[in-house]
Image (cartoon, helix red, strand yellow):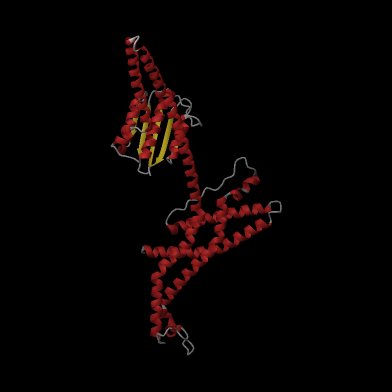
Amino acid sequence: MTPTVRRLGADTVYVVVSMLLSVPTLVFALVGFSVGVGTVVLAGVGLLVLAGTLMVARGLADLERLRAARVLDRPLPRPHYRASEPTDSTIRRLLTPLRDGQSWLDLLWSVLQYPLAVIGFTLTVTWWAGALGGLTFWFWSRWLPDGPDQHGLAELIGLGDSLAAERWLQFAIGTALALSLPWVVRGSALLTARPAATLLSDLADTRIQLVRSRAQTRAAVSAEATALRRLERDIHDGPQQRLVRLALDLGRARQQLDADPERVRETLDEAIEFTRETLDELRTLSRGIAPPILADRGLASALTAVASRCPVPVALRLDENLAAGGRLPDAVETGVYFAVAEALTNVAKHSGAGIASVTVAADGATVVASVIDDGRGGAHMSKGHGLAGLADRIEALGGHMTVDSPAGGPTTLRWELPCE
């Protein structure tokens, strides 16, 4: 059986079953909604009827998602329906579907399915009947009544009143309908399946993506603000203080220039030393903003440099592609680099660990990185702590961060980021 024939059969079954299901579904939806609205004033009985109607509509929607997925050749994930809270009363739990937007979309589909199914069913039956009837007219036409008042289509359009002309005309019509049948039936099936996918799955997926996008935007803003505050603090506590001291030393040297030349020489030597230290700190800060080794040589070299600078011994494990110099998207490489660098800084400052390990692996679609240390544990992502800012940075890239740090250790930080 060819794929076209299989598709034609599957689409035909879908259209016919849609028609058979649409009638009782429509009746149930209209009756349940009408009774529920009409009896709301009866001590809230109508609300329970509406909730029950929505629950049944949810089950019918689950069935339609399975059917439409086969027509569309793609999965239609079940949306996340609103769940009741553990502290809710029994009545509030029963009425939870009334507060769920997707449940109302399910009920709306129960009504909209009927007109779409009628149109698709009419087109499908018409084309199937026309194709089969026209191609087999030569066989069953012998049993048609043949009287003076009987006029065939060929005679009506001027092709003559002979039986042969009628048979050839019907065969031509049947052939045309048969050739166009797969496309017409396909269109009839999509007429129902695509709106079903939109109402029952795609809208919820779009809503989830919108919420995730907003969360990523908030995380990006928060991570940027945290990074700027840290940079401002580092500049204020380091290079700025040294430059102030340098200015004071140079001013003192100018005052001592005539009275004590030897003292001026000592002051200038101190100023030169402060200048070198300031330059070193500025280089360190610039490395934290945009490490040149990451852009020039890739993630493997950058992580190797970070691990070598860590006071705690670090075992670095990279997958074969990254170890061989394979590259990831720039934003992903930067995110992984800063995550590992921040984690190792925390290990050195706060964990009391004797050893740490860094693991990074990428499978083409996702990169997973982790830092494990044998320190005292107790790390958490509470707001205001360094790990919270790091989590915001990862979330801004569409990733996810987890922390497992029981008291007494070990501590495991894990990041998962999409590579697209």
Q: Is residue 185 visible?
A: yes
**Is 202 placed above or below 184 here?**
above
In front of the other: 314 or 258: 258
What residue is shown at x 61% (from left), y 53% (from top)?
A: 52
Q: Position of residue 26 (x, y in %)?
A: 58, 62
Q: Position of residue 214 (x, y in %)?
A: 49, 43
Find the residue positioned furthest to the right: 42
Q: Position of residue 10 (x, y in %)?
A: 43, 63
**Is 60 placed above or below 383 here?**
below
Could you say which quadrant of the image residue 152 lies in? bottom left
In the image, taking residue 404 as reference, residue 26 lies left or right, namely right
What residue is shown at x 46% (from left), y 34% (from top)?
A: 225
Q: Position of residue 58 (x, y in %)?
A: 55, 53
**Is 52 placed above or below 113 here?**
above
What residue is shown at x 39% (from left), y 84% (from top)?
A: 165
Could you say which quadrant of the image residue 331 lies in? top left
In the image, taking residue 172 as reference, residue 193 lies left or right, namely right
Q: Is residue 403 visible?
A: no
Q: Count the numbered circles shown.
A: 0
Find the residue positioned furthest to the front: 258
Could you say which quadrant of the image residue 376 lies in? top left
Find the residue positioned furthest to the bottom: 148
Q: Quadrant of the C terminus?
A: top left
Q: Quadrant of the N terminus?
A: bottom left
